[in-house]
Amino acid sequence: MKSLLTPSLALAAVLAAPLALAKLPPLSADAQIKADEAKAKGAWADKVGAYQLCRSMERVADVYYKTAKSAGKETRPPVATAPCADPGPFAAAVAPAAASSPKPLEASGAHSPAATATSPPGSKATEAQLDPKKK
């Protein structure tokens, strides 16, 4: 059993290797914009998380120093650190590629009503008159 298992696993690995090394096609412009926005939103979320952690550490240190002083314990002065920086609300960057993209259907007039008809849609000409070559 083991003698068949080892070569079959090796063969499966050899056949699967090209699939693992295959390259994906480049992203379309819209997909690239969405990926960049998701990346920016993730970076902003990391900054918000770091800000919230910094604020909570400040609160814990304040409570510690207050309780230590009230209990009469000797405390060392706190280590000077950079102040917590609030990242503010998320603002998506406007991509220059989006500005040069074609107008959406609503702005391009695709939903506009057709022009008023000035003549009936049909004609009284026969098919032979319309296409004389056809016989």
Image (spheres, helix red, strand yellow):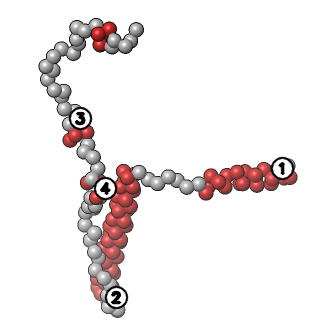
Which residue is label 4 attached to? 97
Eye-nearest disc, 2 or 1: 1
Which image quadrant is residue 18 in? bottom right
Which residue does the image show at 22% across and 40% down from the upper left? 108
Answer few, some or many: residues within 10 Å of disc 2's Cα (few below 14, many 20 plus, some between 14 and 19): few
Q: Residues within 10 Å of mark 3 (few under 14, many from 20)?
A: few
Q: Nearer the viewer, residue 88 or 20?
A: 20
Q: Could you tell me if the residues under marks 4 and 1 are in contact, i.e. CB atoms within 8 Å?
A: no
In what element is the residue under mark 4?
helix
Which of disc 4 and disc 3 is earlier in sequence?
4
4 vs 1, front mark: 4
Tell me where residue 94 appears, x and y as whole percent.
Answer: 27, 58
How many neighbours does mark 1 have within 10 angstroms: few (below 14), some (14-19), or many (20 or more)? Answer: few
Which label sits in the foreground, 2 or 4?
Answer: 4
Q: Is 80 positioned to the left or the right of 113 in the image?
A: right
Q: Amino acid at mark 2?
A: Val
Q: Give the residue pinned by disc 3.
A: 110
Distance from the alpha carbon under mark 1 to that under mark 3: 65 Å
Q: Position of residue 99 (x, y in %)?
A: 26, 54
Marks 4 and 1, how far apart in space?
56 Å
CA separation, marks 2 and 3? 65 Å
Q: Which residue is mark 1?
A: 4
The mark that comes first in sequence, 1 or 3, is 1
Is residue 111 visible in this depiction of the protein? yes
| Tag 2 residue | 79
Relative vertical location of residue 124 with respect to residue 93 in this rendering, above or below: above
